[in-house]
């Protein structure tokens, strides 16, 4: 399968976050391949978005948000890796946090990584997702539009999905816009 191309990511961050729903995240690792349908995302902008890593200025942690769209932006919060994808064009900060997946491939590997057999809970949250998929800081900066990349997102089945939106989770200061998007009724959306 071919990954989504850079022009898909180099658009408005909220639009990318919405349109990633239903797409398939794939990780090819030495331990095996894992994949899942993206069922929940959050959009983060730059200046003017107080919840964003890029709300104030460019730093050692957030510099990747000013680069081209389609790069893996991985950082740690509360001892959990979070997987984001850069959006917008160069010099315009933006990223989409991938919050939850509906697991497809590599279920046994995901269960071992997570230490649970409960399929519904394997990747229902951003920290659970990275643990189940084996995504770490080693993937930071990886170009997910490259067909040879370990990480990629493909179009999947592109079946129509009913999208719902809300305010972002765990954000005390944020934009008034609803920037969390999820597939309504999907059992793998985080709680």
Image (tube, helix red, strand yellow):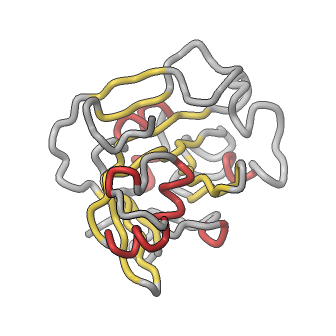
Residue ranking furthest to the top: 176
Quarter-of-image position of residue 44: top right
Residue nearer the viewer, 5 or 48:
48
x, y percentage for residue 57? 83, 37
The answer to whether 174 is drawn above or below residue 153 in the figure is: above
Assign the C terminus to one quadrant of the image.
top left
x, y percentage for residue 107? 32, 69
Task: Give the side of residue 139 with respect to residue 37, left or right.
Answer: right
Residue nearer the viewer, 91 or 35:
35
Task: Give the side of residue 146 with respect to residue 108, left or right.
Answer: right
Quarter-of-image position of residue 147: bottom left
> Residue at coordinates 71% horizontally, 56% vertically from top-left?
79
The image shows a total of numbered marks equal to: 0
The answer to whether 38 is drawn above or below residue 94 in the figure is: below
> Residue at coordinates 37% horizontally, 39% vertically from top-left?
189
> Residue at coordinates 30% horizontally, 34% vertically from top-left?
183
x, y percentage for residue 106? 32, 73
Assign the N terminus to one quadrant of the image.
bottom left
x, y percentage for residue 182? 36, 33
Residue nearer the viewer, 9 or 99:
99
Residue ranking furthest to the bottom: 30
Residue nearer the viewer, 81 or 56:
81
> Residue at coordinates 73% horizontally, 25% vertically from top-left?
50
Quarter-of-image position of residue 81: bottom right
């Amino acid at each position: 399968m071919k990954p989504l191309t850079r022009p898909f990511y180099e658009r408005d961050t909220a639009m990318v976050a919405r349109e990633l729903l239903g797409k398939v995240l794939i990780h090819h690792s030495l331990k095996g391949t894992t994949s899942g349908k993206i069922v929940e995302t959050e959009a983060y902008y730059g200046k003017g978005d107080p919840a964003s890593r890029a709300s104030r200025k460019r730093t050692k942690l957030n510099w990747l948000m000013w680069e081209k769209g389609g790069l893996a932006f991985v950082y740690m919060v509360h001892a959990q890796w979070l997987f984001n994808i850069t959006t917008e064009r160069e010099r315009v900060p933006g990223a989409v946090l991938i919050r939850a997946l509906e697991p497809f491939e590599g279920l046994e590997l995901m269960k071992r990584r997570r230490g649970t057999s409960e399929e519904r809970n394997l990747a229902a949250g951003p920290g659970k997702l990275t643990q189940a998929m084996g995504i770490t800081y080693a993937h930071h900066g990886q170009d997910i539009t490259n067909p040879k990349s370990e990480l990629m997102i493909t179009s999947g089945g592109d079946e129509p999905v009913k999208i719902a939106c809300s305010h972002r989770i765990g954000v005390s200061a944020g934009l008034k816009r609803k920037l969390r998007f999820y597939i309504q009724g999907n059992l793998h959306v985080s709680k």
